[in-house]
Amino acid sequence: MPRWFCAGALAAFVFIFSIFSAAANANVLVQINRRTQTMQVSVDGVPRYSWRVSTGRAGLGTPAGTFHPRTLARSWFSRKYHNSPMPHSIFFHGGIAIHGTYETAWLGRAVSHGCVRILPGNATTLFGLVQQEGMNATTIVVH
């Protein structure tokens, strides 16, 4: 087999691998605005989702700052608050997580114990995105 063919095949492989590697390492930015009770999700700088949330109420506020997910849990129940369901939890600061809620009437108001609650379907979507792109490629900013 000619050398140019092997070099060409190797170059094509490297190019295709770099495309798949870049796709698997997209940067996910989750921005949570406590004042407006909204979440914006962007992938590689392109806005993808905008959702209403419920953050921590007075005295139990959601911490401000920049975080990365620490743990993902598809099914979780609060050990601290009456075994409350926390589907598709993305833990980012101690016991504080972004997760689905069945208390959907409260979305848009700061009523949680510190977690960021979103619709169950949105939690599923965000969980899948973070799982696909990776926790290291995901940044959570709470304003």
Image (cartoon, grey):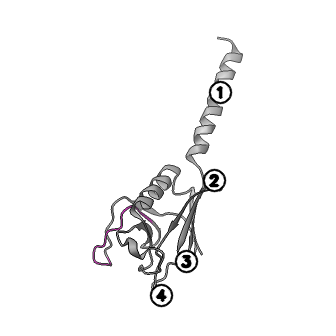
Which residue occupies 68% across, 12% down?
2
**Mark 3 vs mark 4: which is more N-terminal?**
3
Pointer 1 local density, CA inside 10 Å: few below 14, some 14–19, many at least 20: few
Residue visible at 33% across and 65% down in the picture: 76
- Which disc number belongs to residue 44? 2
Specify the quadrant that holds the N terminus: top right
Q: Quadrant of residue 8?
A: top right
Badge 3 amino acid:
Arg
Q: Position of residue 135 (x, y in %)?
A: 51, 57
Furthest toward the bottom, the residue is 59
Q: Pinpoint residue 126: horizontal percent, then vertical percent.
A: 48, 58
3D distance between C-alphas at marks 1 and 2: 25 Å
Q: Earlier in the sequence, mark 1 or mark 3?
A: 1
Report helix, strand or loop for mark 4. loop
Q: Is residue 107 magenta?
A: no
Which disc, if any, is residue 58? 4
Q: Which residue bears the numbered disc 1?
A: 12
* Residue at position x 28%, y 77% in the image: 82
Q: Circle 1 sits in a helix, a strand or a loop, which is it? A: helix
Per the rendered image, the range of residues in magenta is 80-90
The relative height of residue 31 versus residue 111 in the rendered view (above or below) is above
Q: What's the CA distance linking mark 3 and mark 4?
A: 11 Å
Q: CA distance from mark 1 to mark 3?
A: 47 Å
Return the mark for residue 34.
3
